[in-house]
Image (cartoon, helix red, strand yellow):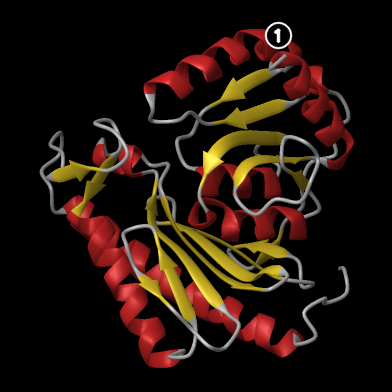
Amino acid sequence: MSPDKSGAPELAVELRQLAEELATAAGAVALSGRRSVPRGAQPSHGTKSSATDPVTEFDRAAEELIVRALRARRPDDAIVGEEGTADDGTSGIAWHIDPIDGTANFLYDQPAWCTSIAAVDEQGSISGAVYAPVTDELFSAARGHGATLNGETIRASDVAALDVALVGTGFSYLRDRRGAQAERLTVLLPEFRDIRRLGSAALDLCYVACARLDAYFEEHLNSWDVAAGLLIATEAGARASDFDGRDVREGAVIVAAPAVHDLLRDALRDATR
């Protein structure tokens, strides 16, 4: 276990527990909402960045639950939510919330969606939790305290070559970006064991953390997509960077088993020339 870097290990653990509690509660609300819709039907929904980027009433209900609890229990913290919450704070802690990451999966009643919550300070994520309601799996981490899945310690894989690596990725909802990503994938795919596209960035990151994936890359992400999962993956021993090898905040992300991180970064660079 790496030493705590926050200067406040008790705070990291406290915020991890709160993130776990709220992610589980909000995920349960979302799952209950999905189960209230007849099998084979879709919940009523609107769209966000494009006609294929959905949002439902259950996204908003889950975010409202989290925000209400945070305002009551951590009133001085900032809150940044995917569904529009933008509260300023004075404590130096900001909560980045994705109430349903993988809304398209949620819409079609596929299991790969989750609730993602992270507490962030000036150094990055200090604590985070990702809860997958359909499988009842809770991933979490606190800076310097390792990562767990349902309370048990998890570690990234030790794969050392790209040609035997199972690699996750995701695609933009914007047509031009998707076309460019598809072209790049025709170059990359022969270099890997295979590709997986789950449709939830937070779960992809957690799957690297528990060695269900050896690596993951994606771009055009927001802070709420990665704040919790990135901490969970790195606390599990994975290496993380943007596509140029620099620190990640949001945007472009590579997270991989340590031995293949640089290999994947170089392959991405070659595929985009």
Q: Residue at x 76, y 47 (%)?
A: 240
Can you say which quadrant of the picture contains the N terminus? bottom right
Please name whichever residue, 163 or 265, is drawn nearer the observer in this view of the structure: 265
Q: Report the front residue among 29 and 96.
A: 96
Residue 147 location, quadrant: bottom right
Residue at the disc numbered 1? 190
Residue 183, image x, y percentages: 56, 10
For residue 28, what is the image quadrant?
A: bottom left
Look at the image and tell me whether residue 210 can be seen: no
Q: Position of residue 156 (x, y in %)?
A: 77, 47
- Establish if 121 lies above or below 116: below
Q: Position of residue 80 (x, y in %)?
A: 44, 67
Count of numbered circles on the image:
1
Q: Give the x, y percent position of residue 173.
A: 38, 30
Circle 1 — which element?
A: helix
Q: Residue at x 43, y 19 (%)?
A: 176
Q: Is residue 109 left or right of residue 102?
A: left
Is residue 136 visible in the rendered structure shown here?
A: yes
Direction from residue 68 to residue 178 in the image, left or right: right
* Amino acid carrying mark 1 in the image: Pro
Quadrant in the rendering for residue 109? top left
Q: Quadrant of the C terminus?
A: top right
For image coordinates 79% across by 72% down, the residue present is 144
Left or right: 146 in relation to 75: right
Label 1: how many Cα within 10 Å (few below 14, some 14–19, many 20+): few
Residue 31 shown left or right of residue 116 in the figure: left
x 60%, y 83%: residue: 92
